[in-house]
């Protein structure tokens, strides 16, 4: 049994609300603070890495939601991309007697020691975005990555009218089921259009803007007939977009990606060659993760696995999702 405490009336945001803008940030926290009594809870946020905008936004979202609840404290760790340190960080949080842990696994997948340590200490774990393998957990909240990739593939195929050359930029090889799901989703659609040729960049852009610039520059040097570029996340595509603009080919190449990063949404909203993304906003998921762990500590029954809706965002609906004040 996980620790049961006085009921915290933290009204969790519905999935539909979370998929549509950010006007209700923190609304659940105010209700929780009003009725949770004097008990103080400490939640650990164990990050595999805070080296990318996506994971920074997710961690900050948990902290921001907690700030609206006067009796919930948050302790944040950053493993710097080191799996062994993530395990140590979780063990340290356990020794500090936190009540619950939110884990942002980032590019990591296999970390059974992390989950097993928390289970042995009878501390509930909520995973956000990445679902770690090889251990037990209380709940997971994240996207259906292959479904997002399929959405992008459909957009690309339709915009190319079934004919053209598409380059794919990947994030990284290690435990990359998230990126693989996205890329496989795109390829699964495009293979049904024999007039569309796909090229996978041999180098990894490592999920960042700088990597996107470098990999795209190499692609542009080698291929003069590119019509579209798909990236496994928005950060890489924002970099690729810059490389294409610098090469004077912005009028011939459009972009498709994943996440709903606010800078990418602004490009889509402004009608640039950034055509589409799939919503996987870390700000939203981080807030959901906070309310999920609060619900668990309050003794509520929660879903084991929650797939967050990931609507397709194009120029037609970007205004609905764009929030310049979003953490991501």
Image (tube, helix red, strand yellow):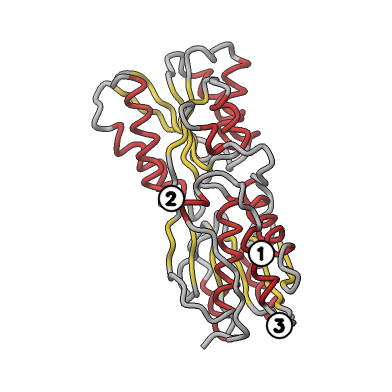
Q: Residue at x 67, y 37 (%)?
A: 324
Residue 250 location, quadrant: top right
For the residues labelled 2 and 1, the Cα–Cα distance comes to: 22 Å
Decide if residue 248 is on the left or right side of residue 313. Answer: right
Mark 2 closeness class: few <14, some 14–19, many ≥20 residues within 10 Å: some
The label on residue 29 is 1
| Marks 2 and 1, the one that precedes in the sequence | 1
Image marks 2 and 1: residues in contact by CB distance under 8 Å: no
Decide if residue 83 is on the left or right side of residue 96. Answer: left
User: Would you name the residue on which mark 2 appears?
Assistant: 309
Report x, y in % for residue 218.
55, 24
| Marks 3 and 1, the one that precedes in the sequence | 1
**Compared to 120, does 315 lie above or below?**
above
Residue 38 location, quadrant: bottom right
- Nearer the camera: disc 2 or disc 1: 1
User: Element type at marker 1?
Assistant: helix
Q: Residue at x 57, y 63 (%)?
A: 289
User: Would you name the residue on which mark 3 appears?
Assistant: 97
For the residues labelled 3 and 1, the Cα–Cα distance comes to: 23 Å
User: Element type at marker 2?
Assistant: loop
Tell which of 170 and 281 is nearer to you: 281
- Image quadrant holding the C terminus, namely top right
- Nearer the camera: disc 2 or disc 3: 2
- Nearer the camera: disc 3 or disc 1: 1
Q: Residue at x 50, y 75 (%)?
A: 138
Mark 1 closeness class: few <14, some 14–19, many ≥20 residues within 10 Å: many
**Compared to 314, does 93 lie above or below?**
below
Report x, y in % for residue 222.
49, 19
For the residues labelled 2 and 3, the Cα–Cα distance comes to: 34 Å
């Amino acid at each position: 049994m996980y620790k049961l405490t006085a009921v915290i009336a933290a009204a969790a945001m519905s999935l539909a609300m979370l998929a549509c803008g950010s006007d209700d940030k923190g609304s659940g926290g105010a209700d929780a603070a009003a009725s949770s009594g004097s008990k103080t809870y400490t939640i650990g946020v164990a990050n595999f890495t805070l080296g990318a905008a996506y994971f920074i936004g997710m961690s900050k979202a948990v902290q921001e939601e907690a700030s609206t609840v006067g009796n919930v404290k948050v302790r944040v760790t950053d493993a710097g991309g080191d799996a062994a340190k993530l395990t140590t960080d979780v063990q340290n949080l356990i020794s500090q007697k936190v009540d619950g842990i939110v884990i942002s696994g980032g590019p990591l997948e296999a970390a059974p020691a992390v989950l097993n340590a928390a289970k042995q200490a009878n501390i509930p774990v909520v995973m956000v975005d990445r679902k770690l393998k090889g251990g037990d957990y209380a709940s997971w909240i994240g996207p259906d990555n292959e479904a997002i990739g399929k959405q992008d593939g459909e957009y690309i195929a339709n915009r190319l009218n079934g004919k053209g050359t598409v380059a794919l930029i990947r994030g990284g090889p290690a435990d990359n089921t998230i990126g693989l799901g996205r890329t496989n989703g795109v390829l699964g659609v495009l293979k049904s259009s024999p007039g569309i040729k796909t090229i996978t960049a041999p180098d990894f852009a490592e999920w960042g803007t700088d990597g996107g610039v470098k990999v795209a520059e190499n692609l542009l040097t080698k291929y003069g007939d590119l019509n579209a570029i798909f990236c496994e996340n928005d950060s890489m595509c924002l970099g690729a977009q810059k490389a294409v603009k610098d090469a004077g080919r912005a009028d011939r190449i459009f972009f498709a990606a994943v996440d709903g990063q606010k800078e990418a949404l602004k490009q889509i909203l402004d009608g640039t060659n950034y055509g589409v993304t799939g919503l996987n906003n870390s700000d939203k998921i981080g807030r959901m993760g906070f309310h999920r762990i609060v619900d668990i500590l309050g003794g509520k029954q929660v879903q084991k696995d929650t797939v967050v809706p990931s609507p397709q965002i194009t120029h037609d609906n970007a205004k609905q999702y764009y929030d310049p004040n979003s953490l991501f």
